[in-house]
Image: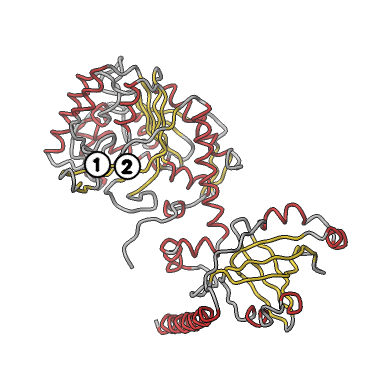
Amino acid sequence: MENKENQTVDENSIIQERRNKLTELRKIGVAFPNNFNPKHESSELHKEYDGFDKPTLEEKNIEVVVAGRMMLKRVMGKASFATIQDRTGRIQLYVARDLINNENNPELYSSFKKWDMGDIIGAKGKLFKTNTDELTIEVTEICLLTKSLRPLPEKFHGLQDQEMKYRQRYVDLMVNQETKDTFLTRSKAIQSIREFMVNNKFLEVETPMLHPIPGGASAKPFVTHHNALDMEMFMRIAPELYLKRLVVGGFDRVFEINRNFRNEGLSVRHNPEFTMMEFYAAYADYQWLMTFTEECIRSSITGCGVDLKLTYQDKEIDFSQPFDRLTLVQAIEKYSDKFKSEDLLNAGFIEQTLQKMGEELPPNRSLGSLQLALFEAVSEEHLWNPTFIIDYPTEVSPLARASDNDPTITERFELFIAGREIANGFSELNDPEEQSERFKKQVEQKEAGDDEAMYYDTDFIRALEYGMPPTGGCGIGIDRLIMLITNKPSIRDVILFPHMRPE
């Protein structure tokens, strides 16, 4: 405790010292100039010139202009070395008194020696190689662009610092290359998904985030109020019903990389605000969807330059092989030898089993709801390699088309990888009368105390009454997919600004 207090005192004294420096800067000119234009980036310079030897580089006489945050500084009398970091990487500067001092600023080098780690600087000079063969800029002009008032952390470690990484992501990105790489990979993965969808003739669209009626998934929504309309509104839990309205309107293939909001708990796999890619294809069923989802996920992995046989938490996941497919009941039987097939058709037996296991019972005690609860309890965590769980019970799939062969199940799948749900898709229910009845049952469940049950959406029923072609739709959890690709244990590691309690 005392050590922590000492650290706080030390930091405060450093901040005060830097504020004093800023005060002096304000006296002599513009403290935060905005007239410097860098023309080169460190990674490009390294890529182009690292291979040149010292004499060749000197002969070429290459002038460059760079800017970045000062991360290292070694002052050595009349000359110093500094390392700056831009968005692409780092490069070394050689700063000599006799090269940068001039008639207009004869004390520039003395000022430079007082600049601090974290300051953002601009520099102009010529490339050369040091005796240790490091690409360096011999600086002829240098300026302070932004004064950093807070010291950079020496390192991140331990639980407390992990929390700091989430709370102060901007600092984490400055000092931790691994973090930066994670989010660069995330961007590449999303771009790969977008290109894959467009190449398969899908149209990217945007649908509302504020809904008059929450729908598209079973979840508890965030509630807000629109003052001008004087009405309650809900943050989007899923874009599904709006995207299907577009299919009704004639957009046969649509997708949205969207933000969803669900008023649920926080965990290593849950954040109340998260990213999904949801897509709908007319004249497609859930079998086609599974194959397409496989291809989409492979494309996102290879688009990041990652091997399809990747390691997650010290265990291999092979995306190169066809994904497994099991029914809900088959998955229970595969990962538990306690149950006979007839037991899994007995609602009373499953209910007693769940109670003995100490599992929470679903609000709706139907056979399908109980089967799903048992699956989540005994099978879900074992689904390490990519596995489609298919044929979900109708009562837990209110928007999915029932099977023509067995009306108790739907043409629905969920994709599990590393014990987590990654995607959910199904042949869409396009019968307006049956959808109306499903909504009514959801309303009954809500009135019985199920906060996650759906509302009745009159306008969506009206849209279906105009006629929606046979359609398949799927949602892929982007955050969880990125966790797999980047080998991160927590969803907070792949969200730039995860939600946390206030400090």
Q: How many marks?
A: 2
Nearer to us in this view, 98 or 375:
98
Sequence-wise, which precedes: disc 2 or disc 1?
1
Nearer to us in this view, 318 or 338:
318
Q: Position of residue 85 (x, y in %)?
A: 61, 63
Nearer to us in this view, 398 or 390:
398
Q: Is residue 334 visible?
A: no
- Residue 354's label in the rendered image is 1
The picture quadrant where one finds residue 82 is bottom right
Q: Position of residue 231 (x, y in %)?
A: 16, 43
Q: Amino acid at mark 1?
A: Leu
- Residue 377's label in the rendered image is 2
In the drawing, does residue 181 fall left or right of residue 364? right
Q: Amino acid at mark 2?
A: Ala
The picture quadrant where one finds residue 347 is top left
In the drawing, does residue 434 fall left or right of residue 392? left
Label 2: how many Cα within 10 Å (few below 14, some 14–19, many 20+): some
Q: Quadrant of the C terminus?
A: bottom left
